[in-house]
Image (cartoon, rainbow, N blue to C red):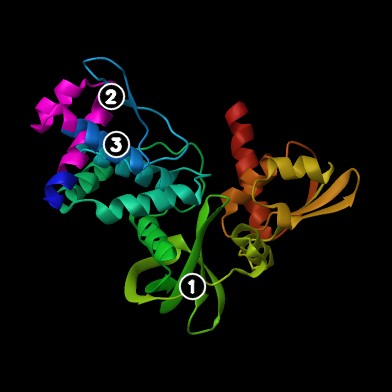
Amino acid sequence: MTSDMTARMLRLLSLLQTRREWSGADLAERLDVTVRTVRRDIDRLRELGYPVDSARGHAGGYRLTSGSDLPPLLLDDEEAVAITVALRTAAGGLTGIEETALRALAKLEQVLPGRLRGQVTALQAALAGITWEDRGPRVDPALLAALAVACRDHEIITFDYTGRQGTVTRRRAEPCHLVDSGGLWYLLAHDTDKDDWRLFRLDRTTDPTPTGRRVPPRPVPGDDPAAFVASRLSAAPTRHRAVATVHAPADHVRAHTRGLATRLTPIDAHTCRLDASDDHLPRIAQTLAALDTDYTLDAAPDVLAHLTSTAQRTLRAMN
């Protein structure tokens, strides 16, 4: 009996989401119940937090409205596939996506029926995107989704990680947060073998495997994951060194170099120093081009060679 009522209420909620307004008689006919039963089910939905307005009169019209809180939504198959693909595409290709979007993707993929997973994978593979600038390695959206679930559930995972020298090792860690910095995604996690916090670049991470062991949430030093990751990145060694003395105030440079605030040092009111070092030569060129002001550069030979060749190609194209 209870299961019948639950199924009927879910069906009622689905109907309310598909049309702006329903009459009580129409709903009763669709659900094969009396109008009185519809009224009782509407009251139950309101008790659960769904904002259902009703119009007076014999017809007794009903409609879902906006409320103070977002109640659970029901999606049909096509809607679920569309939202999953959209979230995967955003997570894997766009910059600036918030961690909340990854949590939404994790929730949706966790309950996505098996019959729809093949559709999502096929549609994702068929989509083509245009990258207007080289922002470095792209991340597999499925990897982002799997790690988002592990972060949400505080579940220890194991994964293969490729180090800077190309050596692959199997790691075991407590995942905490996913952070996007300048187009590169990082997993902030507590390495269980080293008993310390570590940053793992997602483009070097493969084969994440849940262990089934969940642990209490571990507080991040300073209670600010993004700031903690930024401080670690600013102190981490990079493959290509490039330090610019910029002839502009630090605030000007900060506004033009997203994610590099911890590498910016004011010298005086009109000058500052920016450490634009990176593992990716094109990204150094993009950072310097974004300064929109004059600067002097102290950089490694490979950086200077890359910048010189880029400038020469540009000049040749103008002739």
Q: Residues within 10 Å of mark 2 (few under 14, many from 20)?
A: many
Q: Position of residue 196 (x, y in %)?
A: 57, 79
Look at 35% across and 46% down and name the residue there: 88
What numbered label is drawn on residue 126? none
Assign a secondary structure to mark 3: helix
The residue that mark 3 highlights is: 43
Q: Which residues are magenta?
A: 7-36
Tag nearer the camera, 2 or 3: 3
Decide whether residue 22 is among the magenta residues: yes
Assign a secondary structure to mark 2: strand
Q: Quadrant of residue 40?
A: top left
Locate residue 188 relative to residue 81 in the image: left or right: right
Residue type, mark 1 in image: Gly
Task: Give the Cα separation between the discs numbered 2 and 3.
Answer: 11 Å
Look at 19% across and 44% down and name the residue there: 119
- Mark earlier in primary sequence (2, 3): 3
Residue 127 in view of the camera: no
Task: Give the Cα separation between the discs numbered 2 and 1.
Answer: 59 Å
Q: Quadrant of the C terminus?
A: top right
Q: Is residue 71 above or below residue 142?
A: above
- Mark earlier in primary sequence (2, 1): 2
Instruction: Give the mark count.
Output: 3
